[in-house]
Amino acid sequence: MAISAKMRRFAENSSWIRKMFEEGGRLKKLHGEENVFDFSLGNPNVPPPDIVRQKLIELAGSEEPGAHGYMPNAGLPSTRAALSSYLCGEYCVSMAQDLIVATCGAAGGLNIIFKALLDAGDEVMCPAPYFVEYGFYADNHGGVLKPVPVLPDFTLDLDRMEREITEKTKVVLINSPNNPTGQVYSDQSLAALGRILDAKSRQFGHVIYLVSDEPYRKIVYDDCCVPCVFQYYPNSLITSSYSKDLSLPGERIGFVAVGPAAEDAEGIVEALAMANRILGFVNAPAMMQRLVVELQGMCVDIGIYKKKRDRLVSALSGFGYELTVPRGAFYLFPRTPIPDDVQFVRLLLDENILVVPGSGFGGPGHFRVAYCVDDRTIEGSLPGFERAFKRAKSM
């Protein structure tokens, strides 16, 4: 067979998210789209702000010479300058444009970070549950993902993380607000994590980098704020995108920001820019770079997602589901009423409800509900959620 053994293995163990999404397509053909309630994919359904369309029309009509040509691998100077100006306020640090690299989304950002930092066999520690693609991204660059379970409320288990860090640990990767739990890590936990990483870096004689994956940074509720890791640990990098806060996931535009106090920050940026080139990204999309120059700080209407969250939290809690109310992102991660989360997800499939088992995120005994869907889907699903819960409890 022509396909590599590794890719065959990856395909066999492919993402539960995609499996459920594909199952949704089958069920919709069988029962009609209006009778299937698909919560499988975190695809934003709130439209981008009106100004996005206006600016795209302006950019498409521009006759600026070289507008679609090559550029520095780190991105257009104007884009990096706009990001620098905005992030100085957002992160409350002095953020020079030379410390910013425009990327093909946050996924592209993580890949160039791992390419720049990892040697073969280096470990990337992350709290679990975690976004399923992290393991693939680490493997792309010779790394090994090392998940560490969180506490029952999905906050960081700092004692366990401290015990699990070894001389092989090169990166600690966090995602806040978190996919799939919606948890936001507090100032206190990040300050404590920073102290742990500083001590462990000195113990093992090499820098352990803290990488914060933040595509949901602006999607937070109830006056929650997402702390900036730069304030708590100098050897940090942040990657983010405009996929969620501007509802532009298909446009693949994001950035990496290197902590201004990081050791050899200039060398890291050079490595990131080279990784952009040699991984085939070359540079972030030119038109999207120009678009986001004028959209810094803007966001979709978060109130729409909050109403969806509140409706589902109220309904599912009323049916008897145990859950932690998410502080950000657009996911619920309830506990399954039976230990086998895959079996329970099959019970929901019988109700034409598509969710993702927590096992797919390293969080068995839970399931993920992506509530970035229309209100009809939410309301139509509720009787099925109740029936599945009662059926599971009677087993």
Image (cartoon, rainbow, N blue to C red):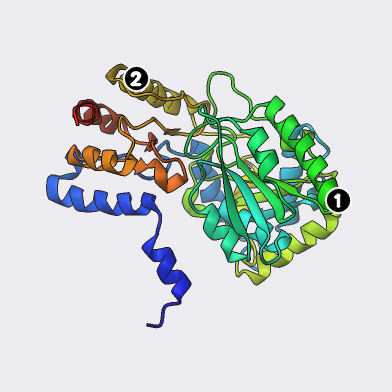
Relative vertical location of residue 117 with respect to residue 79 in this rendering, above or below: below
Residue 137: image x %, image y %? Answer: 57, 59
Residue named by callout 1: 263
Q: Residue furthest bottom?
A: 2
Picture residue at 39% right of the left edge, 30% below the top: 334
Q: Residues within 10 Å of mark 2 (few under 14, many from 20)?
A: few
The type of residue carrying mark 1 is Glu
Where is the N terminus found, in terms of image quarters? bottom left
Is residue 18 at least partly visible in the picture? yes
Figure quadrant of residue 372: top left
Residue named by callout 2: 317
**Secondary structure found at label 1:** loop
Picture residue at 33% right of the left edge, 24% below the top: 321
The type of residue carrying mark 2 is Ser
Residue 25: image x %, image y %? Answer: 24, 52
Towards the viewer: 234 or 361? 361
Residue 130: image x %, image y %? Answer: 52, 44
Q: Residues within 10 Å of mark 1 (few under 14, many from 20)?
A: some
Q: How many labels, in total?
A: 2
Instruction: Report the side of 227 relative to 395 (left or right).
Output: right
How far apart are labels 2 and 1 at the CA level?
A: 47 Å
Residue 21: image x %, image y %? Answer: 31, 50
Instruction: Report the side of 160 relative to 134 (left or right).
Output: right
Instruction: Report the side of 53 relative to 41 (left or right).
Output: right
Is residue 213 at least partly visible in the picture? no
Where is the C terminus found, in terms of image quarters? top left
Which disc is residue 39 wearing? none
Instruction: Report the side of 51 relative to 349 (left or right).
Output: right
Q: Residue furthest left?
A: 31
**Secondary structure found at label 2:** helix
